[in-house]
Image (cartoon, grey):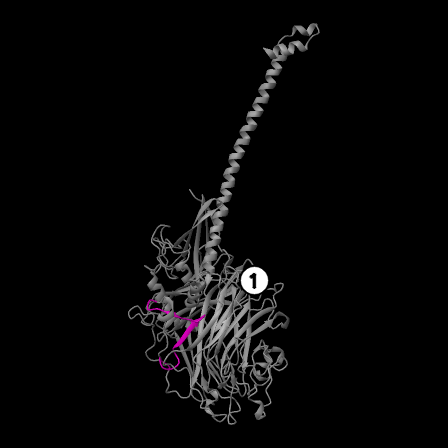
Amino acid sequence: MKMIRFFNLRGTRKGRKNSEKGQVLAIVLILLLTVSVIIVSTLTVVGTTIKTNITYINSTKSLYAAEAGAQDGTWNILNKSSSDLTSGLLNSSSSLSSPKIAYSDYDYNPDGWLYQLPDINTYPVDIRVKNAWVPLVNDNDTSWIPSVIQPLPTGGITPPPPTKAKNIISNIDPNTGLPRVDPNTGLPVNLLVTGGLESYLTYKINIVYNGSTPASLSIFSIGCWLPQGFNYNNGLSNLQGIYATEQVLPCAGNEAVVWTFPPGTTYASLLSRLGGTIKITVPYIATNQFDIPDALAWVVNGPVTDFPYSYTWNADVKVHDIKSDAGNKEVETYVPKAETRALGSAWSGDYVAAGASLMVMGTNNGVIQTTSNDPDGTRFTSLTHSSSTVNTIPTDSGTNVVGAYLYWSGWFDNTNKVLGASYGTLVNFKINGYQVDFDSNGNAERGSGAVAADPVKNQTRVNTPTGYGYSYSCYKDVTALVQYELKTETNNDLNPGNAIYDVGPAAGCILATPAPQGTPQFSMYQWAYAGWSLIIIYSGPSTLGHQIYLYDAFSYADNGQDIDPTRNTNGPGGVISGFIVPPQVSGDVNVAKLTCFVGDGDWCFSGDFIAINAPSQYLSAPLTIPNAYKLWDHIDLPAPTYFIPYGDPGLPNNANSPNNVWNSYSQTGGAADGIDIKTFYIPWSSHLLNPGDTSVRVDMPTTVDSWNLIYIIFSFRSSATGGDSLSYIIRNRP
């Protein structure tokens, strides 16, 4: 009523229109109704939008949290060792409250290992890591052959139990629990599957059967899984005309190609069809021209006496299925991880080498001594121990030791001193003054309970034809010891391997035969030496991608030889392949580096060098290779003082004449008499390696000097692919 009076008071003039009462009221009511509808609708839309945005924001937050969990799981797998997983995050099974079990490379349990990140975007994130059983094999029914229609058996893939899986890969006889060997030759009997890069866009599968019955070993099928980003180039393998079927099947987030063979196909028949070696080429298509696939190959075979299992696979590559749950989002990724000693895999990591001599010419107040009858410095004093310091590994958070390999080597004056507990095989290994070794249960320990380290592999070579006696090399994987001791000492993960390492013979064990003092030069004791070296492989976020190759086939280089450093042969030279050199990164000086551990190199004998990618015209006469292709160790020192009184000219080793490389100098600190532990760098500016190169030739010729090669390790700048999330699946959770 007040509004009506208000409008009436506004109309004060009398006239015809004053008789149209009520029209203004109707208009006002219509306007009020319209405004009310607009306001209510607007408020409703605003409220709905706010609610929708909240839902969207929450959904986005949970997605980001789940993605973060997947990345965390990937980082843990790629940067942690098995021992880290045992005592670290990934140590629960079935649920977060279930009993903890240790991580195992060969445990394919369906629950995997679980852990939780408590608060990411206000969400707890549950992360599950599983070892993915990639080969399309049913452990309960190996007669099943996969097909496009039925890529999995009705009951799904049944992976092998951990013990069986480890026995297959470790070459263990299930009946005896011991490695299988040929009773006639004493050599291992096994069926090996490996893989690597043949050339760009061609992956290769190598299958080797070391046994006495190659004609009896049936081959049913061969498969190869390719990670996401790589697809098989159908029909272009070298198995054309050999296989019965070729199928590309969905597998572990991407695809696998499986070849089946006609009945009666044996290992021997494949050898003859493929030219004497089973090397299967797998052409592929890549999304990035510098990507290298961490593929995984396997073979399904008929068991024979020598190899009682019906299949095996390339265990150098392990595929992990990582799933992360946060809120209503689930992210799953498949990540392959190549093992350290596997040839042909790149990662963000590198290596360092340590070591020292355990036999010298003799000292007086630290000065090396000799006699007038021994101008060439024959070594006659055995050391109780020697140490070497590592301080060059990056110390940023996230850098971890992923491999540590200990080698020791020496010479004996006759072959009656067979390697054993008394000769050559037992050493004490100390880190920062603490002796470390494995207890009876295989766990790392230190202090008074630790015993001498025994090798897992011994190699010997008789020094013939011009030498005398024999030399040996011993090897032990001490990864767990280095990881354990540094964590015990520092109580955190920030020490990546920098420490003082010390090695010496165990009580009652002689590592080499020293020469009697005053022994005339050129006697048999010219070959006397003993020493050790430790290789530490590390991985970290600040390290560029590298591809690492480690060869430890023990070799003896006699006068006039050019050995193949990649295997125990006399060469000439050797070739390493399987990497792709990427474009140079700004600030990156070196395309590659390599380290050699050589025993019994001598300053007084020259004519020994190491050369990279010499032109083909020099391969038949490697001693004529020009200096431009030779590597220099950057150790340019005068001849030792003990040579000078006897008129020795002091043979050079420098950038202009790098022809006395094995001269008993090392870059690792500590005693170096009689051994060379040297690292050589290949700069980009040398153009000895260039972007796109996939192989390198290495020559190591010698003239007068003879020496032993214990190991050679290469690190090439390469594109690191194992570390990316190769399959990324996002699901809404109920």
Residue 609 in picture, x, y percent from top left: 56, 81
**Relative to 460, residue 16 above or below:** above
670 vs 58, nearest the viewer: 670
From the viewer's perspective, is 522 left or right of 181?
right
Task: Give the residue at the far left of this rendering.
Answer: 175
Task: Give percent across and percent down for residue 424.
Answer: 40, 80
- Name the residue: 37% across, 61% down: 106
Residue 145 versus residue 593 in the image, above or below: above
Q: Is residue 438 magenta?
A: yes
Task: Identify which residue is drawn at 34% across, 61% down.
Answer: 162
Place residue 591 in its image quadrant.
bottom right
Q: Nearer the viewer, residue 62 or 20?
A: 62
Rendered-image quadrant of the C terminus? top left
Inspect this view and state whether residue 205 appears.
no
Task: Provide the residue span drawn in magenta.
Answer: 419-441
- Between 588 and 227, which is closer to the camera in this rendering? 588
- Residue beneath label 1, please? 290
438 horizontally vs 393: left or right: left
Q: Amino acid at mark 1?
A: Phe
Q: Quadrant of residue 585?
A: bottom right
